């Protein structure tokens, strides 16, 4: 039985209790949102992960992607990256490995961290087809669903499935004036398969079978945005919106079978289009939790895309997005290392906190008020404890020590707080 089915039947699970406590939300309210599909708790029945709630009225969550590639496969490095991401506040980890030891990488990451784990099963199907049949386009339906079922059995909590890449959406893409075409790797796998085989996407054609697997293991489906824009010029175009319309229908079909589902979103989006994108998704997909990559708000900052995405993420989450996928400084350039992962997570945490304050999330405001009091009273260690990065501000403080404890080297004796003290507060 899925968390959604339990909530629908009025049965309170241990996972619901834990999420309600962490989010400071009434259990009945949480159950209602779970039953309606406005909240999900990605928790495979075979998983030992800590329950995390994603959706309406909850804290904005952060996902960190890790995983090897055919160009760089270092299992120890991927485990370290996953651990670092969680230690700095990532709520979930997605393993996007495409190297030949992808199964071992996934297994070791699942042992190393206790947060929900996500995957993109079409990668496994494509890698196996490339090995055994010579090319990704030669994979068949059995290859795709075997990968999905194998990963569900292993305990994967949520899966990105590109069900919205259909023959019709691929045709619309072909007729569009996009600069970047398809930038989603999973979306490209399936678009290439459709073009080569002249057949409908098996994940769309056999969607009911996919739902049966998801229901059996309570895998949360993350409906992938295979046609997300890869540059600002391509944002909010017909292929993107057409895919979203397809996903809206698939959300309703998943809910009818009590399968937990969320929807993925763009991508590269100009600031002035972000709020509209969030509103369209929430309307078309009937309030399903929205999981966005970034959004990246300018294409002019390679090496700094953790910043461009944090800007977009703050706006997106304040406008309705529930779940942010981090972006590292190496986006578009190289596989991230441990330092890049840390920077990506912290940037996304900043975006999520800014959005949660705007949304009136109680825990976000509690932390802001605590930090204000710590700063007013020159409680440096408390400030460092509250900060997303505990070490960096401490190093700055120690590296440039002030003459007195109740000042810093920025203002020194002319510190505004020291000059007026409690007189004006």
Image (cartoon, grey):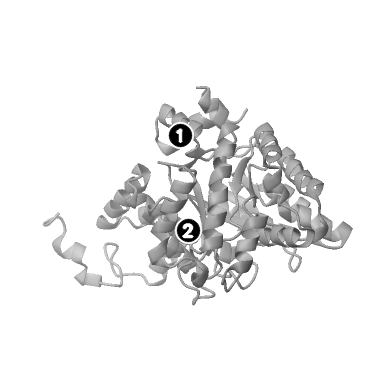
Q: Position of residue 15 (x, y in %)?
A: 54, 31
- Using the image, determine if residue 9 lies above or below residue 133: above
Disc number placed over residue 236 in the picture, else none: none
Q: Position of residue 365 (x, y in %)?
A: 32, 47
Front-most of residues 61 and 375: 61
In this picture, residue 186 sits left or right of residue 404: right
Residue at image x 78%, y 62%?
196
Front-most of residues 17 and 82: 17
Residue at image x 73%, y 56%?
123
- Using the image, determine if residue 297 lies above or below residue 246: below
Pick whichever of labels 2 and 1 is earlier in the sequence: 1
In this picture, residue 17 sits left or right of residue 203: left
Front-most of residues 86 and 141: 141
The residues bearing labels 2 and 1 have C-alpha atoms spaced at a distance of: 25 Å
Q: Position of residue 423 (x, y in %)?
A: 11, 56
**Nearer the camera: disc 2 or disc 1:** 1
Name the quadrant of the N terminus: top right
- Using the image, determine if residue 203 lies above or below residue 268: above
Q: Residue 71's quadrant in the figure?
A: bottom right
Residue at image x 47%, y 58%?
348
* Residue indicated by mark 2: 348
- Circle 2: is it few (<14), some (14-19), or many (20+) Cα within 10 Å? many
* Residue indicated by mark 1: 33
In this picture, residue 151 sits left or right of residue 421: right
Please, what secondary structure does the residue beneath circle 2 have? helix
Q: Residue 152's quadrant in the figure?
A: top right
């Amino acid at each position: 039985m899925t968390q959604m089915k339990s909530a629908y039947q009025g049965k309170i699970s241990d996972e619901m209790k834990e999420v309600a406590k962490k989010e400071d939300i009434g259990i009945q309210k949480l159950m209602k949102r779970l039953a309606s599909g406005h909240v999900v708790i990605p928790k495979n029945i075979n998983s030992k992960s800590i329950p995390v709630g994603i959706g309406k009225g909850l804290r904005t969550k952060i996902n960190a992607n890790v995983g090897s590639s055919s160009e760089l496969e270092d299992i120890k490095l991927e485990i370290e990256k996953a651990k670092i991401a969680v230690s700095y506040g990532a709520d979930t980890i997605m393993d996007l490995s495409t190297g030949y030891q992808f199964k071992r990488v996934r297994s070791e990451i699942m042992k190393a961290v206790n947060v929900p784990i996500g995957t993109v099963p079409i990668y496994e199907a494509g890698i196996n087809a490339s090995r055994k049949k010579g090319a990704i386009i030669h994979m068949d339906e059995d290859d795709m669903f075997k990968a999905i079922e194998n990963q569900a059995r292993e305990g994967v909590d949520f899966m990105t499935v590109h069900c919205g890449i259909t023959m019709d959406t691929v045709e619309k893409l072909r007729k569009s004036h996009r600069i970047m075409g398809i930038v989603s790797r999973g979306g490209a796998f399936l678009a290439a398969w459709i073009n080569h085989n002249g057949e409908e996407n098996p994940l769309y054609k056999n969607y009911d079978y996919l739902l049966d697997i998801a229901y059996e293991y309570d895998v949360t489906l993350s409906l992938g945005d295979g046609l997300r824009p890869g540059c600002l010029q391509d944002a909010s175009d017909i292929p993107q919106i057409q895919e979203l319309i397809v996903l809206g229908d698939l959300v309703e079909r998943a809910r009818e079978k009590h399968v937990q589902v969320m929807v993925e979103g763009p991508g590269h989006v100009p600031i002035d289009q972000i709020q509209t994108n969030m509103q369209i998704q929430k309307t078309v997909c009937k309030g399903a939790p929205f999981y966005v990559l970034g959004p990246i708000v300018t294409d002019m900052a390679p090496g700094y895309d953790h910043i461009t995405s944090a800007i977009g993420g703050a706006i997106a989450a304040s406008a309705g997005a529930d779940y942010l996928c981090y972006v590292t400084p190496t986006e578009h350039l190289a596989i991230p290392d441990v330092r890049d992962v840390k920077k990506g997570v912290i940037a996304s945490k900043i975006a999520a906190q800014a959005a949660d304050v705007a949304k009136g999330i109680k825990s976000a405001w509690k932390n802001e008020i605590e930090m204000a009091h710590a700063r007013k009273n020159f409680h440096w260690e408390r400030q460092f404890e509250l900060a997303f990065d505990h070490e960096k501000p401490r190093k700055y403080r120690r590296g440039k020590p002030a003459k007195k404890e109740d000042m810093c080297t920025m203002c020194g004796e002319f510190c505004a707080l020291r000059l007026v003290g409690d007189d004006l507060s």
